Amino acid sequence: MQVVISAICTQGPSIRQAIGDDNELEKFELILDSHKTPGREPGWLKLRSADQRRGAINVVWDSQANILTARVVTRGTTRPSPIVGHFLNYLLTRHTRRLRAVTTAIVR
């Protein structure tokens, strides 16, 4: 199962890069797993749950549209709700001023 989280943001620097540089990710039970070309377009990063549940969050930033897109992928019967909850809690706590709208969709 996949869950797609889209966040429409105000204009400014990459939120994807801000997430990658954030030293407080672990407070939200998230760990930076890997990233590609921080600071370059296009770039991405991958987050995992700190409690070692299966699943990952792939995050990309569209600088032209100011949209952060996070695709949550879980394997097998693992429910995505814990890692989705951690990520949404993180966004709403650490990047509230930049957020204008946040939507989620389930992709089967």
Image (spheres, rainbow, N blue to C red):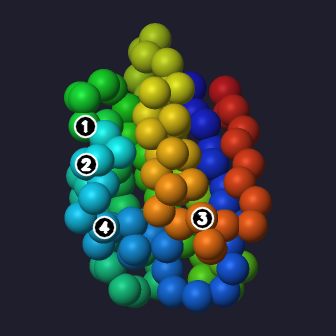
Amino acid residing under circle 3: Thr
Q: Quadrant of residue 86?
A: top left
User: In percent of the image, x 76 and y 60: which residue is there?
Assistant: 101
Question: Does the residue at mark 2 contact the one at mark 1 (Cβ under 8 Å)?
Answer: yes
Q: Is residue 97 visible?
A: yes
Image quadrant where one finds the N terminus: top right
Answer few, some or many: residues within 10 Å of disc 2's Cα (few below 14, many 20 plus, some between 14 and 19).
some
Q: For mark 1, give the secondary structure.
A: loop
Give the CA separation, mark 4 to mark 1.
15 Å
Q: Is residue 67 visible?
A: no
Indicate which disc, 3 or 4, sits on the residue closer to the N terminus: 4
User: In percent of the image, x 30 and y 25: which residue is there?
Assistant: 53
What residue is shown with label 3?
A: 96
Answer few, some or many: residues within 10 Å of disc 1's Cα (few below 14, many 20 plus, some between 14 and 19).
some
Give the CA separation, mark 4 to mark 2.
9 Å
Indicate which disc, 4 or 1, sits on the residue closer to the N terminus: 4
Give the CA separation, mark 2 to mark 1.
7 Å
| Disc number placed over residue 50 in the picture, else none | 1
Specify whether 101 is left or right of 25. Answer: right
Total labels drawn = 4
What residue is shown with label 4?
A: 22
User: In percent of the image, x 32 and y 79: which residue is there?
Assistant: 38
Judge whether 88 appears above or below 17 on screen: above
Q: Quadrant of residue 99?
A: bottom right
What residue is shown with label 2?
A: 26
Q: For mark 2, give the secondary structure.
A: helix
Specify whether 53 is left or right of 75. Answer: left
